Amino acid sequence: MNDLPQTTSADFKLILAIVTRARADIEFMAKVDPIDFGLDMEYTHHIIPLDLQQLLDADGGNFAHDVCGIFNHFNRDTRQMDDFFLPRFSKPEPPKLYISVVKMGRLADGHQGGHGVVRHAMDAAIYHGFGSHQKALCATKPGRRSVGFVHDEGVDEITCKQCQHKIEMYGWQLKQ
Ligand SMILES: [Zn+2]
């Protein structure tokens, strides 16, 4: 593991306290390498933000659920959580919002691709107006000579299958 997640010193202190409590309270955790487990906690907090203070203060059952769950399900190779384990003390995240965009052709030939256009979904937070060159959810990007993506006011439909798949998989919601 080379690139360590960025952890604030306040979070790091809480993680240390959680590791210390886990080793004191939970028998098998006492045999676990505290540095490895501390890293598991840091990576988990990085991919699934945790309410570390609440976890530290939790009663025995809830504390053990999250601590043992993270130890057992956090995958050090992929740095993802296996089996969709979700800690009880994860902070709920607001749903991500998308808008519908289409690729514009080149300005030079005035082509806007009126028929049969593929409507992709784009993270509403990165769309900066007419001519966005950011990636759609499916990772497609306008060509270098294209004007870019454009959102047609009032058109919310998505026709790109891969974008639709991402929307479902990650629970994106349409920006109203
Ligand atoms: Zn797409």
Image (spheres, helix red, strand yellow):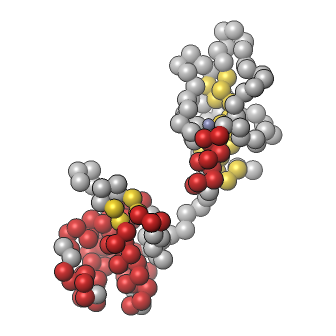
* Residue 81 in view (yes/no): yes
70 vs 6: above or below? below
Q: x%, y% of residue 90? A: 48, 71
Q: Residue furthest front?
A: 83
Q: Describe residue 19's horizontal placement relative to residue 127 as left or right.
A: left
69 vs 170: above or below? below
* Between 77 and 124, the one nearer to me in the picture: 77
Residue sitting at 76 percent across and 41 percent down? 157
* Residue 131 in view (yes/no): no
3 vs 60: above or below? above
Rendering quarter of residue 14 = bottom left
Q: x%, y% of residue 130? A: 67, 29
Q: Residue furthest right?
A: 154
Count of numbered circles in the view: 0
41 vs 116: above or below? below
Q: Describe residue 138's horizontal placement relative to residue 48 as left or right.
A: right
Point out the image quarter for the N terminus: bottom left
Q: x%, y% of residue 152? A: 76, 33
* Between 147 and 87, the one nearer to me in the picture: 87
Q: Describe residue 67's horizontal placement relative to residue 89 as left or right.
A: left
Q: x%, y% of residue 139? A: 53, 36
Rendering quarter of residue 155 = top right
Residue sitting at 26 percent across and 71 percent down? 37
Judged from the image, the quadrant occupied by ligand 1 is top right
Residue sitting at 60 percent across and 30 percent down? 132
Residue sitting at 48 percent across and 77 percent down? 88
